[in-house]
Amino acid sequence: MGDLEKFQKLKKSVLLEYQKHYPYFQGNWKNFSSQDIINLIDLVQQILKENVSEKWIYTHLKKEDNEKLPRKDMLDIFSKFVGYSGWDEFSFEKIPEENKKRKNKFGLIGIVLLVVIFGFFTYLLIIQSNKNKIIDLKNQYTSEKIDENEVKAYEVNEKEKRPLPIENSQIRLEETENKNTKILIESPYYQKKTVWIDSEKNEEKTVVDLKPEDYAMMLKTFIKSDIKDWKTRKVQLDTILSDNLEVMVMLKNNLGAEYFNKKEFSEKLILPTASVKKMKVLEINKDNDNKIKFIRILQE
Amino acid sequence: MKIVIFYTTIFFLFLFSFEGKSQAVISTESQKSKDIKVQFSENSVKVFQQSSQSKVKDFYEYLGLLTSKTLSEELRKQTEENIYSLVENKNIEIIDFTSAENAKINLQALILKLMRETYEIKFVVKSEISFPTSANYWLNSYLLEIHQNNKIESKKIEQKVYFSPQIKSFGSEQKEVWVISLGEISLKNGI
């Protein structure tokens, strides 16, 4: 409520107070006569020992629409006249109870509305995160995380085979319109795995165990090894490698390739040098006897 | 009769000349197919040259292993086999690294000398580069550090590296593949 509105309230209160002293007056400021003005001036003089001019009453109290607030000292006088310590108390006190209740009511509704909106968005967020699926990849035997450099994942449909990033041994799938999503997981060191993800299920995480390819894992170990145990390595290589083995070593930027047979490749792994340790296995194929018949390597 | 003999002679003369020409064509074609620059782009040759630089390092790593005092007879033989797999042939002419005179020696002889060395040797290859190709080889140039008995000796080396197609056996199958083989070693500029 603005100050002018409060002043209008003060004027009403002054009239009511006047009527206590002059009960036969039942009018309003419009028909407040000159005699009433004199009576009011006398009352203020008697009660407050303050002087109020007739002109001021005509200018401010009798005027129906006040364009500006009167002087503070006059406001104080008439606030005291109606029982307050001054204008400050009157203007503070006189906020109607109905407005207070309305304010409180609006405040409560606002809080409730905020809670509802917040709750709605939280609900949406939970639903959304549930729609984003996570595939957790683990080594079947050790339950350890896999090295994402050794595994590739793809989302497969009729039209394409889209690569999916793997981070921290996890694949994150975004919400799709498809009910079932086919995920293909490939690695030279693990058996190929196909996983179907049902988007309508509320499970956020699916754990997928990848079964290691034993011979491929042995090759990986041999590549990183040193001269120690070279004899054992030689025997094992003869066992796991097919006599028809073809090893394709891809050179930088795929600009060329070198080819090694079983004897040549075995020699490299029996006595690994610095260059052998920079080999990265990309693909392994086995024959019907489960021996490795083809290896594709990237020479880093 | 004379006419028959005459025309028969002319016919066979013509036939032989045509065959000779095809032989030339075939031999030219077969020569071209072994020419590195014809078969590979400049960038492809560069990556094969980089691979040859790794093989040079492997070569010296194996040579140094021969001087190890803990080397068993079996491991010595295996190391020898690995060395021979890298080179054009067992008798390529190289530098006798065990002598101060930098005399020429064949690879087999050097291997025997290295196995009798009193102190272990470590060979370190540095600043290796490859020069543009000839038809079937290029030259690798590098600084070879010979670490022995707390002493380091450096030599500027030039080595031929052959790159050519060969028929290689993969068990029961055979395939023609291009093979990098390390060749003769000499001191650069005779120094």
Image (cartoon, coloured by chain):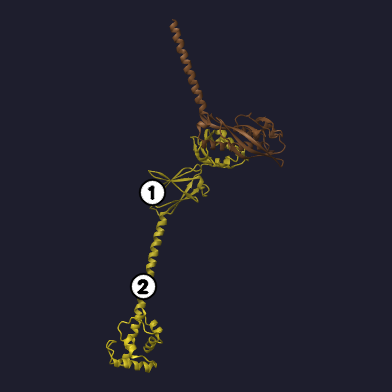
Chain colours: A yellow, B brown
Query: In the drawing, what numbered circle is on residue A180?
Result: 1
Crowd tier of the residue under label 2, counting other residues whose Cα lies within 10 Å: few below 14, some 14–19, many 20 or above? few
Discs 2/1, front: 2
Q: Read off the residue under disc 2.
A: A106
Residue B168 x %, y % = 53, 29
Q: Is residue A281 left or right of residue B60?
A: left
Quarter that holds the C terminus of chain A: top right
- In this picture, is B149 found above or below B109? below
The amino acid type of the residue labelled 2 equals Phe
* Residue A9, percent from left and from top: 34, 83
- Picture quadrant where residue B85 is located: top right
Mark 1 Cα-neighbour bin, 10 Å: few <14, some 14–19, many ≥20: few
* Quarter-of-image position of residue A77: bottom left
Q: Which type of secondary structure does the marked residue at label 2 adopt? A: helix
Q: Position of residue B132 (x, y in %)?
A: 56, 34
Left or right of B190? Residue B29 is left
Q: Is residue A89 above or below residue B172?
A: below
Badge 1 marks a residue whose secondary structure is: strand
Q: Amino acid at mark 1?
A: Asn
